[in-house]
Amino acid sequence: MNYRIKALFISFSFVATLSAQRVEWVSTTDNNRWQTSNKVKLEKALAGTQFDITITGEKAQVIDGFGGCFSELGWDALMELSETERNKVIYNLFNPQEANFNYNRMPMGASDFGMNFYSFNDVADDFAMDNFSIARDRHILLRFIKAAQKENPGMHIFASPWSPPAWMKTNNHYASTASTKGFNGLPAERNNTKDATGFRMLDGYLKAYALYFSKFIRAYEKEGVTISAVYPQNEPCSNQVFPSCKWRSEDLAFFISDYLGPKFEEDGIKTDIYFGTVNTSIADYVRTALNNEKAAKYIKGVGFQWSGKKAIPIISKEYPHLKYVQTESECGNGANIWSQAEYTWSLMHQYLTNGASVYAYWNLILDQTGVSPWGWRQNSLITIDKETKEVKYNPEYYIMKHISKYVLPGAYRLITNERTDHLAFQNPDGQIVVVIVNQEETDKEMNIGYKDKMISLKVEAKSFNTIKF
């Protein structure tokens, strides 16, 4: 008799499992972060149900990952913490059990959130790169990167210079535009001409710069860090008050086609070359390079940021064989408030629905001021107060984590109905991940349809949600 009861119990349990599969659900509001629930189920769809989200199962692009950018100011803030607290922050950013940042960016030399101007070779006219050195990085950026690698050993690192060594530029300065605010020091009469390339487009300089890239990749390899891809110039369409260098598209393509690509071939370097990071809405800027056959054979993909969000829908359709990356999230004003995380969601939706395989945030960590040496206050995922040692996880940390923790490398984005409040993915193991953002001031009842199944749930007002089944 006991055996019969046990068999009946197992039978009923099996039927229940078939009819209603439990769903993992995590939600975040500004007042309640990362709340888990087991109250929703995947059930057989009821006839006549109106679906708010319909997941077709049709696959779009492969997702390679998510991440942010290593910076000197980020590491400087981290070093204010005890080793235990510092390791906890690193864990929460990079470990697969937490935010799982596996596709991260680094600057080659100075950036706007570095401590000051520098390059790997500041010795003028050293075309042979005899004085090339990453000694400074060994004390700062490499320590940051290696700490992250301990939590996520398989992570990808992509790199781009904000500026070549100053002696390679036409104005002999890291900045391109003078400013009296912050650390700049460029005389106004040496501002880069509005539409001119700021690099010295002469054979000796171009050869030396290609060698500079090659030496950088080899030097980092010796440190145990593989550079997956390089982007020859950060924001090549702007003359900035911080380290920068404007390039005409045809000049950047020429550098790739006749110098950088051939140098990588000569030196046996397998690092991918991407065009960018493109910060203009003008699609012709990208077309000029991609339609250059000599350059195109070396270009694996294109990186977009800022105004590039308006160009990616056009370019990804015209050149579907290439990879596309969102290389830098827009930086905000240092307020680190909920509405800015909602805006970051809109950027993620824009890029991912238009073919991006990677979404990279900008400042992983900053101190309580959020200010660069050039006087620009910006957002960060995490804020560390140097005086009180408080660690604050800002709203943008959570919107990133709602995707990056659950959407694994090799996942496909899935086609859904055209709404801007959700994204859907299928992981390599077949599990479905749906991210839903409710920006309204009221709770919202939602029905999600997938094949012959459905999920019904109520998402809170002003909330981020991830469901996995």
Image (cartoon, grey):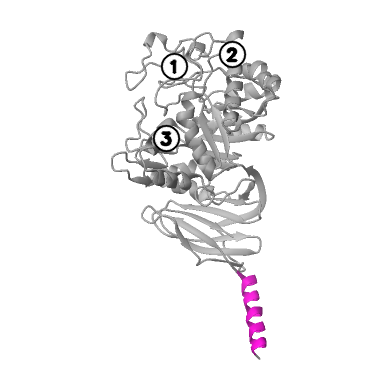
Q: Which residue is identified by label 2?
A: 208
What residue is drawn where x is 69% and y is 19%?
262
What residue is drawn where x is 62% and y is 13%?
207
What range is drawn magenta here?
Answer: 2-20
Label 2 close to label 1 by CB (< 8 Å): no
Q: Amino acid at mark 2?
A: Ala
Is residue 238 visible in this depiction of the protein? yes
Q: Could you tell me how far apart the alpha carbons at marks 1 and 3 are, in whole angstroms?
A: 26 Å
* Quarter of image, res 3: bottom right
Look at discs 2 and 1 and give the one toward the viewer: 2
Main SS, magenta region, reads: helix
Vertical placement of 113 versus 338: above or below?
A: above
Q: Position of residue 247 (x, y in %)?
A: 54, 18
Residue 3 painted magenta: yes
Question: Could you say which disc has been placed on residue 75 in the image?
Answer: 3
* Residue 370 relative to residue 252: left or right: left
Q: Could you tell me how far apart the alpha carbons at marks 2 and 3 are, in whole angstroms?
A: 30 Å
Q: Which residue is identified by label 1?
A: 176
Dot 2 alpha-carbon crowd within 10 angstroms: few under 14, some 14 to 19, many 20 or more: some
* Residue 441 relative to residue 134: left or right: left
Q: Position of residue 447 (x, y in %)?
A: 54, 61
Q: Amino acid at mark 1?
A: Ser
